[in-house]
Amino acid sequence: MSQHREPVTAIGAPAAIGPYSHGVRAGGLLFCSGQIALDPESGELVGASPAEQATRCLENLQAVCAAAGAGLTDAVRCTLYMTDLGAFSEVNDAYRAFFAADPPARVAIGVAALPKGAQVEIDAIVALPS
């Protein structure tokens, strides 16, 4: 393993469904892989609405952050991938519950499809505490 990067595995996040790490620490940052709305226990997709799925995505990202000694509120940037940008407002409401004050920079991208038929995927770049 390279000394300038360290993979992070989060016990409380769903198992990776491909060849990737939950996150990678490098240069004082945590680069979190995208999370879809998978239940950490069953590995099954949960949440009927985009807002419910966004909530599960953010809970999964919280687990990845915690495994690296940070919190989701330490995020400096998030990217939201959505199969229906018509749900933008409801996803914003779910997102706002996790970032009530000083939210990170963010990008929202409309996509044709996501793994396992998910409606939302979210990734994050997080500043690690000193």
Image (spheres, helix red, strand yellow):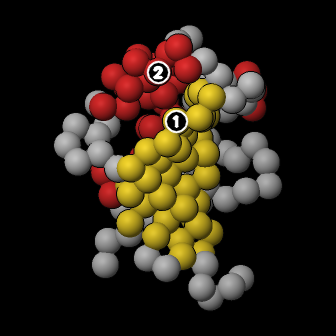
Residue under the image location 44 percent in, 38 percent down: 59
Would you call the spot at circle 2 few (<14 residues within 10 Å), some (14-19), or many (20 or more)? Answer: some
Residue type (three-letter) at the residue carrying disc 1: Ala
The quarter in which the N terminus is drawn is bottom right
Rendered view: 78 above or below 130: above
Helix, strand or loop for disc 1? strand
Helix, strand or loop for disc 2? helix
Would you call the spot at circle 1 few (<14 residues within 10 Å), some (14-19), or many (20 or more)? Answer: few
89 and 75: which is toward the camera: 89
Identify the residue at the far right of this view.
19
Q: Which of the 4 quarters of the picture holds residue 74?
A: bottom left
Where does the image place residue 34, in percent across and percent down from the top left? 61, 45
Q: Residue under circle 1?
A: 108
Where does the image place residue 113, in percent across and percent down from the top left? 74, 26
Where does the image place residue 78, in percent across and percent down from the top left? 47, 47
The quarter in which the C terminus is drawn is bottom left
29 and 17: which is toward the camera: 29
105 and 39: which is toward the camera: 105
Rendered view: 40 above or below 72: above
Residue under the image location 39 percent in, 50 percent down: 105
* Image side of residue 8 versus residue 105, left or right: right
Q: Residue under circle 2?
A: 88
